[in-house]
Amino acid sequence: MAKPALATLALGLLLSVLSITSCKKYLDIVPDNVATIDNAFTLRNEAEKYLFTCYSFLPKDGDPLLNVGFMAGDEIWTSLDEREFISYGWRAARGGQGAENPYLDAWNGRYQGGGAGDNFGLFKAIRNCNIFLENVQDLSKIPDLSISERERWIAEVKFLKAYYNFYLMRMYGPIPIIDTNLGISANEDEVRVKRAPFDECVTYVDGLLDQAIPNLPQIITDKSTELGRITKPIALAIKAKLLLTAASPLFNGNADYSGFVDKDGVKLFNTTYDANKWKKAADAAKAAIDAAEAAGFKLYQFPGTTFKLSDTTLRQLTIKGAVTERFNVNLEHIWANPNSRTGNLQRTAMPRLATTVVVGSARQQLAPPLKIAEMFYSKNGVPITEDKTLDFTNKYTLRTAVKSERFYIKDGYTTARINFDREPRFYADLGFDGGVWYKYDSPTNSDEGTFSVEAKSNQVAGANNFGWYNETGYFVKKLVDWNMINGSNGASYRDYPWPQVRLADLYLMYAEALNETLASPSADVYEYLNRIRARAGLATVQVAWTNFSNNPGKFSNKNGMREIIQQERLIEMAFEGSRFWDIRRWKRAAEVLNQAITGWSVYQPTNSEYYRVRTIFNQNFVSPRDYLWPLRTYDLTVNPKLVQNPGW
């Protein structure tokens, strides 16, 4: 039997009973005793259960309560009523984080950290991966397991172990490296493992991925039982994400961490900038793209329908479908997690569109602040602050939609000027007062005269139900599958597995990393960014900035292109949990998260009252403290070799 290398880890050999909805049951019970551990690796069938136990720790990012990036930043706000929606991430976003009992504590698996029910601490996950590897790499065990399958299982668990380490590193920075579990006879000093310098953690995780990649399949061929299992393109994508994170300003030459040392005086961050880290990230992203495209992955395009729809609506269904279309037909999802479902996510995002919809079946609780709405481009594909042909100076004044705008905004409806003349992703991603919300059960069987949001306080989607209302006046439309159906007995949502990695994400990663390696942007930087813009219905960066921006040469220099790439990423990856990590690794959180959370006056019934900007909350991000998660104070007590993150 093995003993954990950290005194902070639980002493039980495995988790209690867990169940996962999937194409297959990915987990079984492994009770806490030596006999069961021995038995788990006697036959293939039993060992497979342990394999799926290692998978079971994958964070459930399709749940808005469990995905750190959903509620812990500034992208989505909600009501103080917290009606059946207790988000510790959102409490952290409001300044409630602390070291005594940290919210979203993935280190230990507490307060929604790592997963539901405080059972998914990621050091527990790493420990289980180590137990699996120690046993399955022993050729004297599991005699009915073939060599090829053994190699694949080992590769999968090495990937999982790498991913759990990477997840912790994004949150905490330097972490202890637990490569093997210590024996039960290990002394107290051996069990107390200290944090390794961040660059050593990166090298270690990168090495695990390199070991895993050769023995992973290129694609999943048995889709009935193996969807969600790890493939070569998935591992290459996470390697690219790891190296991009390591190359970014938060972790690459950050002078704020110059005094961050362990108890022995060892520096936990290298504060000297290393340009080669960007080169490694660019190479890794390109390798991941090549592997994904060779495996048949491509940007999603809506396949069409028998309904009569405008090109405008079809474009929106393409943009939304890149996330919500299920992965058995969606070739953009390099990694979709079938154990992380999205039913609750859709219900909390969906507004009531008709009085027949039962209150509570469309809860409209996920509310993007006004600054997120302002982030999207104009219809010309440039920031609204740069568009020289469209005037957004008086962006909060009112305007009435005309017939030619009816596929975006209800004909004859009055709404704010900021909701007009925007790019297709604005209308695909966001719902708003007067905004059209086309879906499968449209009363007209087309997008003519279809559903629209009516969000003032005396209207159907207004703030008139305790806790189940929208706090800002903007709704997350992107994450609700278009097959959602209203009904007098409730609402029906078509579930989809959460996309952990999309091909568009890789394109953006490559463009960003490559731009940082060059003196000025290359053709490839433009190419991979423009692929995403083309799918979104926008002109190329070169054409859009040349013709419509008051800074027409912005795209031609490295710094300007960096700004363009970052905004493109924030838009394309909106509401997928990416923004939270991106603004941190770019070291922009101190700027972005010290801005007020604002929205419309949603408790008001008339246009003149509703369309007044109100401050909902003044966020306070303390730098450098808030860039990294605090370690729990108790952990520092039981393991004196650990040091706390700066500022906590």
Image: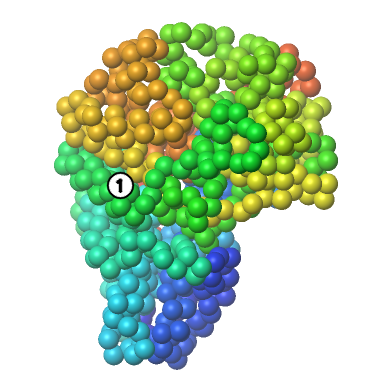
Splitting the image into 4 quarters, where does residue 587 fall? top left
In the rendered image, is residue 255 in sight? no
As drawn, 582 above or below 288: above
Colouring scheme, one of rainbow, by chain, secondary structure, one colour: rainbow
* Circle 1: element type: helix
Determine the residue positioned at 22% across, 51% down.
199
Give the image location of residue 192, x and y in percent: 32, 69
Of 623 and 339, the residue lying toward us: 339
Of 576 and 165, the residue lying toward us: 576
Splitting the image into 4 quarters, where does residue 256 fall? top left
Give the image location of residue 23, x and y in percent: 54, 66
As drawn, 67 above or below 579: below
Q: Is residue 318 left or right of residue 405?
A: left
Q: Is residue 365 left or right of residue 58?
A: right
In the rendered image, is residue 28 in sight? yes
Of 588 and 182, the residue lying toward us: 588
Q: Is residue 29 left or right of residue 625?
A: right
Give the image location of residue 251, x and y in percent: 28, 43
Determine the residue positioned at 29% across, 81% down.
147
Quarter of the picture containing the N terminus is: bottom left
Number of marks drawn: 1
Instruction: Identify the residue position indicated by label 1 in the image.
Output: 289
Type of amino acid at the residue the image marks with label 1: Ile
As drawn, 302 above or below 139: above
As drawn, 613 above or below 317: above
Determine the residue positioned at 53% across, 43% down.
303
- Within 10 angstroms of label 1, few (less than 14), some, or many (20 or more) residues? many
Give the image location of residue 288, x and y in percent: 29, 50
